[in-house]
Amino acid sequence: MSNKKNTQIISPSWGELEGKLIPAIIQDATTKNVLMLGYMNEEAYQKTLETKQVTFFSRSKQRLWTKGEESGHFLNLVDIKNDCDNDTLLIQVHPVGPTCHKGTGNCWGEENKSNYGFFSTLEDIITERVANKDTSKSYVASLFSKGINKVAQKVGEEAVETVIEAMDNNDELFLYESADLLFHYLMLLQAKGFTLKDIEAELKGRHK
């Protein structure tokens, strides 16, 4: 079964917007991070649709400007959405290289990386505590100090406990053991040198 998205692009009513520039919010189609804000007139909009590379009207240059025309860091078009007031565009892209001219992932000085909410926070906490190696105060550091076999063994134990609770009727205990399993699995991923991003890539590769 195909997973291709059927995109419906609803164009702004340029007759009503004649001579005006409208904001174009640029969002990474994969990470969902906002990368930058630019402005478009009808000509820039049409060129974006034709070339599949995002083109703005540069207020400083006073001309059409395709992002990446000098740096090679293009914004390849994925999707365009027009907002409810017909005066702002949300444009999803696959960026080639950093978006900001200063070399950062977006124009707010941030890295454009996938974020998995609190799971990403847990990954950062695990990384920090492993680096600190304070085995007297940190359970994470203490378990890591015993080697990868111990980390893997703990994941196995938590998996068994989760399965046992799944076959019972105590949902609270099932969720408790599931949280333990996931936390220790994040530890095992790091012990093997991987992150959730690697798991995401593997699953995406399987999705046909």
Image: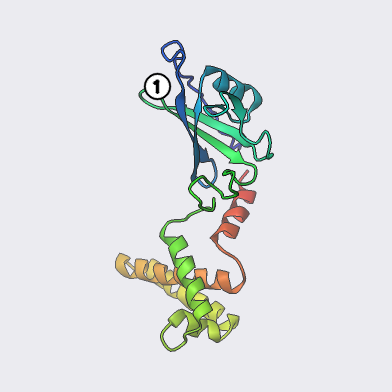
Task: Name the residue beneath numbered marker 1.
Answer: 86
Q: Is residue 20 left or right of residue 45?
A: left
Residue for point 57% across, 33% down: 78
Front-most of residues 166 and 98: 98
Please tell me which residue lies in front, 156 or 124: 124
Question: Of all residues shown, which one is farthest toward the top?
Answer: 15
Q: Position of residue 176 (x, y in %)?
A: 35, 70
Other residues around mark 1 within 10 Å, as few (<14) / some (14–19) / many (≥20): some
The quadrant in which the N terminus is found is: top right
Up/down of 120 relative to 187, above or below: above
Q: Quick one: SS at disc 1?
A: loop
Q: Quadrant of residue 63?
A: top right
Q: Is residue 30 left or right of residue 19?
A: right
Any part of residue 167 in sight: no
- Closest to the observer, 203 or 117: 117
Residue 152: percent from left, percent from top: 56, 77
Task: Report which quarter residue 196 is drawn in.
Answer: bottom right
Colour scheme used in the picture? Answer: rainbow
Q: Visible in this render: residue 91? A: yes
Residue 2 to residue 32: above or below: above
